[in-house]
Image: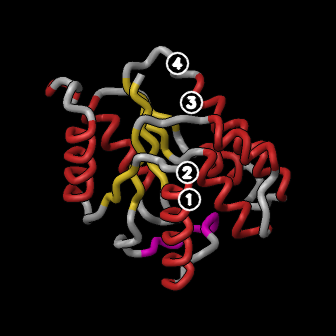
């Protein structure tokens, strides 16, 4: 299985990009579990809820064990960074889940998209978005995670992501891309 993670700060198009890529490639994807979880709780959560969301995110990925290619809209890395920023720490459970999960490639969505207001999002300021982007780059580099930055608006962003995937996985047939 080829597992591709799509991570990045809030409002950087992770979900839209994941869905578009899955449709083009013709493969399954996992949705961002935190969005569904928080929606059922009117956006309210505690530090413990982050651990629950991390477990649920892993379970969502594990459902697709037989897929040849799996796109993951956010990962436990996102929850780890979220916890670090919100609470100044991250639980051992989230950290362990994050470090145990392996992806063949990670796409980091840039903050070049305009902010879209959403009651579940917490960091709209340009300074916050840059700080979060820096944290993602630090995390990816510190753990030697193979990643590439996805930039561009609309179809350009999708095409840029597809080109990055094609370059990384030339063995994927043209029919899959």
Number of other residues with Cα within 10 Å of mark 2, as a class: few under 14, some 14 to 19, many 20 or more: few
Which one is in front, 39 or 163? 163
Q: Position of residue 143 (x, y in %)?
A: 55, 51
Residue 51 is labelled as: none
Q: Residue at x 49, y 69 (%)?
A: 133
- Whether residues under marks 2 and 1 lie with C-beta atoms below 8 angstroms apart, the answer is yes
Q: Which residue is mark 4?
A: 65
- Whether residues under marks 1 and 4 lie with C-beta atoms below 8 angstroms apart, the answer is no
- Residue 80, above or below 84: above
Q: Is residue 122 left or right of residue 174?
A: right
Q: Quadrant of residue 170?
A: top left
Q: Position of residue 126 (x, y in %)?
A: 49, 84
Q: Is residue 90 left or right of residue 126?
A: right
Q: Position of residue 177 (x, y in %)?
A: 20, 32
Residue 143 is labelled as: 2
Q: How far apart are the two marked residues, 2 and 4, measured between alpha carbons?
A: 24 Å
Which one is in front, 115 or 143? 143
Q: How far apart are the two marked residues, 2 and 1, measured between alpha carbons?
A: 6 Å
Q: Which residue is mark 3?
A: 61
Q: Which residue is mark 1?
A: 139
What stretch of residues is rendered in magenta? 115-121
């Amino acid at each position: 299985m080829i597992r591709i993670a799509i991570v990045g700060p809030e409002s950087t198009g992770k979900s839209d990009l994941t869905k578009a890529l899955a449709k083009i490639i013709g493969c399954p994807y996992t949705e961002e579990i935190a969005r569904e979880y928080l929606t059922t709780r009117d956006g309210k959560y505690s530090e413990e809820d982050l651990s629950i969301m991390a477990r649920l995110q892993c379970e969502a990925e594990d459902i697709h064990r037989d897929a040849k290619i799996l796109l993951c809209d956010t990962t436990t890395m996102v929850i780890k960074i979220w916890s670090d920023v919100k609470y100044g720490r991250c639980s051992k459970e989230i950290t362990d889940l994050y470090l145990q999960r392996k992806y063949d490639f990670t796409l980091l969505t840039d903050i070049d998209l305009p902010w879209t207001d959403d009651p579940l999002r917490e960091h709209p300021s340009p300074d916050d978005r840059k700080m979060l982007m820096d944290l993602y780059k630090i995390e990816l580099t510190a753990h030697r995670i193979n990643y590439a930055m996805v930039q561009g608006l609309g179809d350009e962003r999708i095409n840029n992501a597809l080109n990055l995937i094609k370059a990384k996985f030339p063995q994927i047939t043209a029919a899959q891309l």
